[in-house]
Amino acid sequence: MNEDKDFLVEQAQLAEAEAEAQAEADAERIRQEAEDATADPAAQQEWIRQSNLIYGGLGAAGLVVVQPFLTEPSLDPSATVCVIAFAVAIPLLAALLVLNRQEEFRRRASRSPFVGLAKAVAQGSAFVGITAAFWHMSMIAGIVFLAVGFVAVGVHSSGYVRLEYDSKFRSRFTRRKASDA
């Protein structure tokens, strides 16, 4: 009876070890796919194009949203948050647009951590600025914009992951090696 129990425990341990090994292999495969996608020049070119659209759109929105506040003698708290957020975002977005031109010229994206931080701060500040502008007009509009903004990020992320990391989709397109070209 003890032998059967020991055998079952041993089998369970083997199955657990195999599951761990499979999970590690899957994680490594996903990491490698992400690394390959990051190194893909065509993907980098597309990210640069998308970044141009994002930075240009956010910068233009900031200029339009802040313009009415230029002539106001005093600002309420939401308007002040809006103006300060865009005071941070607009120069960073402009710098990132100029950097994108250099990235286009070099046909690769910058890997600087400082640039990554600037992207996060610029986009986050622009989001805060737009939210504060809606909040200034109506608290309900500000809350709705904030909530739907987070939903939109989820929608984009879900679609992106499905497009980029769905093995059935990616397996239909074999990447040509440099020697094949």
Image (tube, helix red, strand yellow):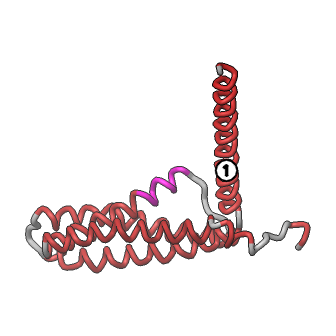
Magenta stretch contains residue 35? no
Image position of 9 (left or right of 91): right
Crowding at label 1, few (<14), some or many (≥20) Cα neighbours within 10 Å?
few
- Inspect the image, locate mark 1, and give the three-letter code of the amino acid beneath it: Asp
Q: How many marks?
A: 1
Image position of 129 (left or right of 122): left
Question: What residue did someone put label 1 on?
Answer: 26
Magenta stretch contains residue 117? yes
Rendered location of residue 104, percent (x, y): 63, 72
Rendered location of residue 14, percent (x, y): 70, 33
Q: Please name the residue shown 67% across and 38% down the image.
A: 15
Rendered location of residue 35, percent (x, y): 67, 55
Q: Secondary structure at mark 1?
A: helix
Q: Which residues are magenta?
A: 113-120
Q: Please name the residue shown 48% across and 77% down the image.
A: 53
Q: Please name the residue shown 26% across and 72% down the image.
A: 145
Q: Quadrant of the C terminus?
A: bottom right
**Residue occupying the far front of the picture:** 1
**Residue occupying the far top of the picture:** 2
Image position of 48 (left or right of 86): right
Q: Please name the residue shown 33% across and 77% down the image.
A: 61
Nearest the eye: 33 or 89: 33
Q: Quadrant of the N terminus?
A: top right
- Above or below — where is 17 with respect to 84? above
- Above or below — where is 132 with respect to 32? below
User: Residue 91 occupies which quadrant of the picture?
Assistant: bottom left
Nearest the eye: 91 or 144: 144
- Above or below — where is 42 with respect to 92? below
User: Residue 38 occupies which quadrant of the picture?
Assistant: bottom right
Q: What kind of secondary structure does the magenta stretch mostly adopt? A: helix
Rendered location of residue 6, percent (x, y): 66, 23
User: Residue 111 occupies which quadrant of the picture?
Assistant: bottom right
